[in-house]
Image: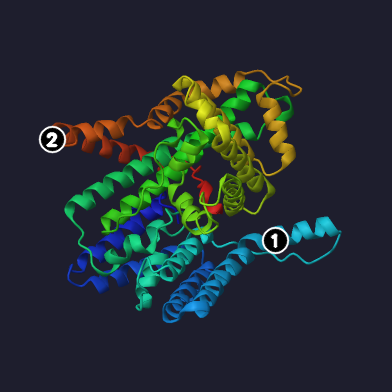
Amino acid sequence: MVFSSIIFLFYFLPAVLLCYFLVPRKYLRLRNAVLILFSLFFYFYGEPKGIFVMIVSIVINYLGAIFIDKCSGRKKKLFLILTIAMNLAILCYYKYSTFFLDNINQLFQSHIHVPEVVMPIGISFFTFQGMSYAFDVYYRTVEVQKNPFHVGLYISLFPQLVAGPIVRYQTVAEEISCRNTSLEDVSAGIRQFIFGLAKKVLLANPLGLVATEIFSQNIATMAPLTAWMGIIAFTFQIFFDFAGYSDMAIGLGKVFGFHFPKNFDFPYISRSITEFWRRWHMSLGQWFRDYVYIPLGGNRKGLPRQLVNILIVWLLTGFWHGASWNFILWGLYFAAILVLEKIFLLRWLDKVWQPIQHIYALFLIVIGWVIFQFPTFHEIFAYLTAMFGLNEGGDSINLAVYFWKEYRFEWIFAAICSLPIFSALWNKYRGSQKFMLITNLFTIILLILSVLSLVGSTFNPFIYFRF
């Protein structure tokens, strides 16, 4: 079940809101029980078998944290290692076992049976959340939670269950046990949810249709303009798809009294790749920073060690996104750029004209999305060849012209919404009643347009479900 679906918007969401708010505020435990039951149903609806994996993950992290908290010294560290190892074992089995066995068979010409493993939706997200709880208990940044239902709610809470943001336990620990849902939070949450829905439905879906159609063409004869249009459409799609879903998750969290961290901060206005990764999928970047980069030594052990740490983090970041060589290449691609920026590129960039900095960052980001999108090295090379006019050629630019004319409003609004224009207006005029009235009317219009688009379209993918 995805947020941008009729069944979620008109059946599941009204049901959970009705049951939740019918419970008086003073009965917070009962409200939490409502959220747990609906969260389990939400996951069960889309992943009946996977729900057992999620419950096992909850049990592992709850019990692991209990033992970590009770012990000290070597035993404490041993229980942390065991808890993390069990989390990784689950993740590796469901997400990476087929990849590893396939590569072993190819490398050694062996015939090891490769089982058909169905990866539970969102396993990378809820596994990382569970591990962050164990880490934080070990480092004593949070107190261990003795109530298993609190840990269960933290990991299974449906708004951020399958696609993040990756929420630290310390962010919501107090709100799980004591929270007041204010009218202001509910209003802001509904508004953010609708904005996220509009990003997904009105921008990501139509531009995703453009990307899908172009990627299905013969790359060998594709015109450069068509190739660039395809990958730029995907560049917008993946941003509005994921950022829209994050906005919906954060908005729903506010409705129920939770305050999840921001996950995107207008990444396409970046002037370097270093800045881009401070703005894109921020919760994942912070996770790797706190639990991998800093424990490895971060930047405290000299530049050579820091560069090695960056390489390790980005190798893991790429592999987190999927069990495929293109994701590993994608991670290493950005690692190489980040290392170069750390050594000298950032100093050079600071001296050049700002528009050149933006062009530099956007160019490298778009090339990165080519690596991300195509699963084989051959396809990656072929598409890059088409983009720079080094293929056989032959196709006209009619397809690109058609997609520009057919979706020109989506292209224009995608470019505008990639900039912090509304954010600046909001910060400046949100105290104005007139501005708030206009904003609320605009929000209602977006909701109507989004629902009409959903009713009239069958193209509604969500890229990050595969992670």
Tell me what residue is drawn at x 72 percent, y 40 percent: 377
Residue 272 appears at what percent x and percent y? 50, 32
Residue 291 appears at what percent x and percent y? 49, 59
Q: CA distance from mark 1 to mark 2?
A: 57 Å
* Residue 241 located left or right of residue 395: left
Name the quadrant containing residue 373: top right
Name the quadrant containing residue 143: bottom left
Residue ID for mark 2: 433
**Amino acid type at image mark 1:** Thr
Residue ID for mark 1: 98
Question: Which one is nearer the viewer's eye here, 105 or 302?
Answer: 302
- 6 vs 68: above or below: above
* Residue 336 located left or right of residue 133: right
Question: Which one is nearer the viewer's eye here, 345 or 40?
Answer: 345
**Amino acid type at image mark 2:** Gln
Question: Which one is nearer the viewer's eye here, 299 or 418?
Answer: 299
- 13 vs 460: above or below: below
Q: Can residue 291 be seen in this snapshot?
A: yes
